[in-house]
Image (cartoon, helix red, strand yellow):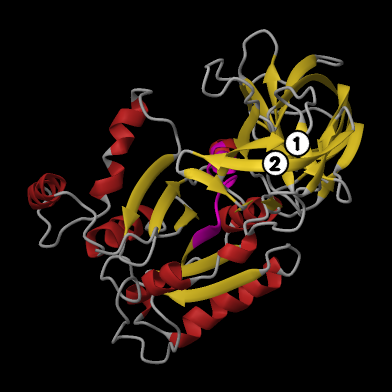
């Protein structure tokens, strides 16, 4: 039996309300045999009741909507499935403008965005908004699925027209890798199998793209950052002097005998060992969770960061961020928040709102300084203690933060550091 661990691709699906997102997800799950038999029977029975002569695959995800109406399910629905080549987590994000914050939540850990476009409508405002958020969150790969090709007789011209529109718009964005694929989610054209209806399309079907797209180099393996999550002191006779620092490698690689410095104290040491549940390692890299021990007895606390001596993050109390505001209430002037950055929590205020972004046109709005729910704005924050930060474009973990309301403990905003 092959015990090799499959890598995991996280992707979001975004599209306007009637673009066929639910049908596409249902098709991926159905054709990859990731739907349980009892779920399939229920979908077949519901389809029959509706008088359909085919299985309505959208029912597999739309079943959540009733729960959502009762406030049971959060607005981002996560789905897990796998093929022999790769495991996948889909974050199905809502299409409506009032759920911009939910898309930000779903997209924050994604490797890839699937943006659905109805071939008859072309690039609409929601397409632009979803693409802007994908770009803002530095999602490395975007696949534009031009859906409902069956409704335009699988026309190559209609597909090319949508591609041209998107190319023109996405030139203003910072997405590195954009691919286009003509599909019919309803009939399965170019979803898992190549379509006989579109012999003019020479690319691969969607599932093949998802299985083979190269994601291992998307992580930052250069700047070693290890935010300390927990101090391990077993207090047992066998490990009487053991003192380890547990956490997840945020970026870079760390090896035994590396010269390191602990921030904020500035004390230097060497890596003595890298421990895991399965034994010691010579090297660790993201997103591994490990315990580091140091050769010197240094005072290290949760929220400290272990980095290499010759490669340090920026240390500052003034932070320039693109902020997505999540809360119904606007922030009060000089209101204090908890700011959570990696494993570190400090207090902070919004010092200045520089401009807001019109997500549909990408224009800057400089005369409106109020933050409303789902607004995206460039702001300056001031913290009570220095943070150790990188630009979000270089490091999605040490470059991101959240703001938490001090009174209610609600997460009110997420920020990407410029």
Q: Residue at x 70, y 57 (%)?
A: 220
Relative to the observer, which residue lies in front, 106 or 55? Answer: 106
Packing grade of label 1 (10 A; few <14, some 14-19, many >=20) is few
Name of the residue lying farthest toward the top: 407
Residue in the picture at 46% in, 38% down: 277
Can residue 368 be seen from the camera position used here? Answer: no
Residue 79 percent across, percent down from the top left: 36, 46
Q: Secondary structure at mark 2?
A: strand
Mark 2 closeness class: few <14, some 14–19, many ≥20 residues within 10 Å? some
Residue 414: name its quadrant.
top right
Asked if residue 348 is positioned above or below residue 216 in the image, the reply reads above
Magenta stretch: residue 81 in it?
no
Q: Which residue is mark 1?
A: 295
Which image quadrant is residue 232 in?
top right
- Report the label total: 2
Looking at the picture, tell me which residue is in the foreground, 227 or 144.
227
Q: CA distance from mark 1 to mark 2?
A: 5 Å
Image side of residue 372 versus residue 332, left or right:
left
Asked if residue 110 lies left or right of residue 416, the reply is left
Q: Which residue is mark 2?
A: 272
Picture layout, residue 159 above or below residue 187: below
Q: Which residue is at 80% across, 27% downward? A: 370
Q: Are marks 1 and 2 in contact (CB under 8 Å)?
A: yes
The magenta-colored residue range is 102-115
Asked if the stretch drawn in magenta spans residue 114, the answer is yes
Q: Quadrant of the N terminus?
A: bottom left
Q: Earlier in the sequence, mark 1 or mark 2?
A: 2
Residue 141 horizontal/vertical position (percent)? 59, 64
Return the mark for residue 262: none
Displayed quadrant of residue 312: top right
């Amino acid at each position: 039996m092959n015990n090799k661990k499959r890598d995991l691709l996280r992707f979001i699906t975004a599209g306007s309300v009637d673009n066929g997102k639910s049908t596409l997800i249902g098709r991926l799950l159905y054709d990859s045999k990731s739907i349980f038999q009892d779920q399939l029977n229920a979908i077949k029975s519901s389809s029959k009741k509706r008088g359909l002569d085919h299985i309505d695959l959208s029912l597999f995800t739309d079943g959540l909507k009733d729960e959502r109406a009762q406030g049971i399910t959060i607005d981002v629905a996560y789905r897990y499935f796998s093929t022999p080549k790769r495991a996948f987590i889909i974050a199905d994000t809502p299409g409506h403008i009032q759920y911009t914050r939910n898309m930000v939540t779903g997209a924050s850990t994604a490797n890839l965005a699937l943006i659905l476009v109805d071939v008859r409508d072309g690039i609409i405002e929601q397409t632009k908004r979803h693409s802007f958020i994908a770009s803002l969150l530095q999602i490395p790969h975007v696949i534009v699925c031009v859906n409902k090709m069956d409704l335009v007789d699988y026309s190559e011209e209609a597909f090319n027209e949508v591609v041209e529109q998107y190319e023109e718009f996405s030139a203003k964005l910072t997405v590195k890798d954009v691919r286009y694929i003509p599909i019919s989610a309803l009939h399965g054209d170019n979803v898992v199998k190549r379509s006989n209806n579109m012999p003019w399309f020479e690319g691969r079907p969607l599932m093949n793209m998802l299985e083979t797209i190269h994601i291992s180099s998307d992580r930052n393996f250069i700047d070693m950052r290890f935010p300390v999550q927990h101090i391990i002191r077993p207090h047992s006779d066998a490990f009487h002097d053991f003192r380890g620092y547990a956490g997840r490698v945020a970026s870079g690689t760390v090896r035994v005998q590396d010269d390191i410095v602990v921030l904020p104290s500035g004390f230097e040491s060497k890596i003595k060992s890298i421990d895991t549940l399965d034994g010691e390692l010579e090297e660790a890299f993201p997103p591994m969770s490990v315990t580091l021990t140091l050769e010197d007895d240094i005072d290290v606390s949760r929220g400290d960061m272990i980095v290499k001596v010759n490669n340090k993050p920026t240390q500052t109390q003034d932070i320039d961020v693109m902020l997505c505001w999540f809360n119904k209430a606007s922030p009060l002037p000089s209101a204090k928040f908890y700011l959570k950055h990696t494993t570190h929590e400090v207090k902070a205020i919004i010092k200045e709102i520089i401009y807001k972004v019109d997500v549909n046109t990408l224009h800057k709005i400089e005369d409106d300084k109020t933050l409303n729910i789902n607004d995206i704005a460039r702001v300056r924050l001031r913290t009570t203690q220095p943070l150790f930060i990188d630009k979000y474009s270089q490091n999605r973990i040490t470059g991101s933060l959240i703001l938490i309301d001090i009174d209610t403990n609600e997460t009110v905003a997420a920020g990407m550091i410029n």
